[in-house]
Image: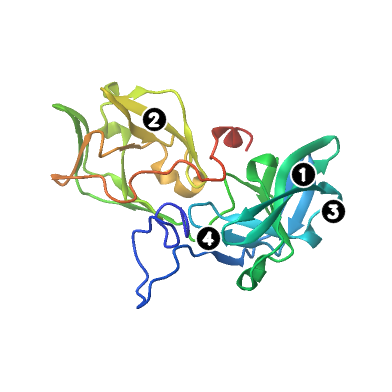
Amino acid sequence: MGLSWQQGPLSSGAVGRFLTPEPLPERLLFAEPLRRRMRVRFNGTWIADSEDVVLLHEPGRYPVAYFPHADVEEKALVAGGRTTRHRDLGDTAWYSVRAGDRVTERAAWEFTALPRHARDLQGRLAFAWRAMDAFYEEDERVLGHAADAYHRIDIRTTTRTLEVRAGDAVIARSHHPVVLYESGFAPRWYVPRTDVDETRLRPVHGQTFCPYKGLCDYYDIGDAHRAAWTYRDAYREVDRIGGLVSFEADKVEVRLDGGLLRPEPGQGVVPHGADRGLDTDEVATR
């Protein structure tokens, strides 16, 4: 998602390419000022509050926020004595985080031997997302990971005809679907429920979470597992798809103006990063 995730320009699966005469390094890391006030809460205490956060975009990972030491509560950090090595950024020192009677080990880290070209992160540390109670921008909680300014969603209406079939059965036919364009993903087509034969949709247990759209519910169609999905209570920014249904083109037959839609790069979703998953329990405490 965004700059370095899914099929963004800095990800390993980028769908585009840089037009340069020489090959770029296999991995490109990008750091920039967040330019938003960000706060961290742990055990009911604000342990970090900064308007000087640097966001690190690293291939295959969600963006990570790095706080200057001066903006972190000094007593909240306990040196852990453990050091690991980052493949690009060198030695990494780990801290436990403490507030009141609660201590969580390996909950924060800092790069202690940065190469000269990465000095933007000098004297800064990051907090493990799921080890904290919550992260905030101003007074609003941020879910899933630090917000990626390069992640964008556009929703467009159309009068094209979308038809969905499973074998000989027509599951949906709409002359006014909407299409959602999201950074790093192939277009997704959503259909109003009035244009769907809901008797063919079998709700399944389990939800997933998108930091930009909300909680997602799934349906089986015949033998096709999780062949359709919906955001029943989509976030305000994308509420135009709230309650609409979308379908997986590799599990059922989806035709747009008669043409068969086939899975394309960016259609499959990588559900979590190497660092952590996006869990629905985080949304429950929003």
Q: Quadrant of residue 252?
A: top left
Q: Position of residue 125 (x, y in %)?
A: 71, 57
Label 4 element class: loop
Indicate the secondary structure of the residue bearing disc 3.
Answer: helix
First in sequence: mark 2 or mark 3? 3
Could you say where residue 141 lies in the image, as x and y percent from the top left?
A: 64, 46
SS category of the residue bearing label 1: strand
Closer to the chain start, of discs 4 and 1, is: 1
Q: Nearer the viewer, mark 3 or mark 1?
A: 1
> Going by the picture, which residue comes out furthest to the bottom?
21
Q: CA distance from mark 4 to mark 1?
A: 29 Å
Residues at badges 2 and 1 in contact (C-beta under 8 Å)?
no
Q: Is residue 43 visible?
A: no
Measured along the vertical axis of the image, is residue 123 above or below residue 268? below
Instruction: Determine which residue is flagged by label 3.
Output: 74
Q: Nearer the viewer, residue 79 or 125?
A: 79
Q: Which quadrant would the C terminus be assigned to in this image?
A: top right
Residue at image x 59%, y 44%?
A: 143
Residue 7, by quadrant, is bottom left
Which residue occupies the foreground of this view, 188 or 27? 27
Q: Determine the CA span between mark 2 and mark 1.
A: 38 Å
Type of amino acid under label 3: Glu
Residue type indicated by callout 2 = Tyr
Answer with mark 2 or mark 1, whichever residue precedes in sequence.
1
* Residue at the spot of label 4: 149
Alpha carbons under labels 4 and 2: distance apart: 28 Å
Instruction: Say which residue label 1 marks.
Output: 96
* Residue that label 2 marks: 218
- Residue 204's place in the image compared with 214, above or below, is above
